[in-house]
Amino acid sequence: MTQVIVLPHVEICPEGALIEAQAGESLCQNLLENGIAIEHACEMSCACTTCHVIVREGFEALEPSDEIEDDLLDKAWGLEPNSRLSCQVIVNETPLVIEIPRYSINMAKEGHR
């Protein structure tokens, strides 16, 4: 199990959280399995930006994003250099500290793809 610290988010996780994530699964799946109701409008198919997270610690240890994820991230609200789509981040043995941005843009639902 890998430790993931979720920084406080006003609506989704007001107190923040510390979860034990399953390595080999997506970060999004791990968050959902641990009661963190992160949006995932495209059902984790890398077709929207609702599961956007900012990886505050552990970013360098993740597998790099691919071109499709990068193209979507360019449209995410609050994009930072260490932004990722949590549905595309596969948890490994490196602990993570993540922040869920205050807002998200639903590219799938809003027809902005």
Image: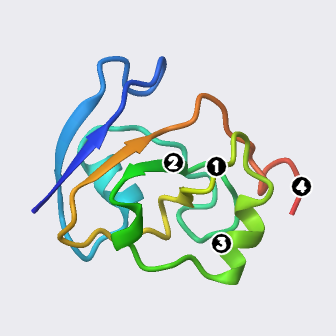
Q: Secondary structure at mark 4?
A: loop
Residue at image mark 3: 69
Residue plotted at (41% across, 56% down): 28
Viewport quadrant of the N terminus: bottom left
Of the numbered discs 3 and 4, the one sitting upstream in the chain is 3
Foreground: disc 4 or disc 1: 1
Cα distance, mark 3 to mark 1?
14 Å
Report the number of discs.
4
Looking at the image, residue 95 lies above or below residue 68 = above
Looking at the image, residue 18 lies above or below residue 67 = above
Mark 1: amino acid: Glu
Q: Is residue 80 left or right of residue 29?
A: right
Residue at image mark 2: 54
Q: Secondary structure at mark 1?
A: loop
Viewport quadrant of the C terminus: bottom right
Q: Contact, CB < 8 Å: mark 2 with mark 1?
A: yes
Mark 4: amino acid: Gly
Residue at image mark 1: 80
- Tell me which corner region of the image, top left, top right, bottom left or bottom right, holds residue 103: top right
Foreground: disc 3 or disc 2: 2
Residue at image mark 4: 111
Residue plotted at (25% across, 77% down): 24
Q: Contact, CB < 8 Å: mark 4 with mark 1?
A: no
Looking at the image, residue 60 lies above or below residue 53 = below
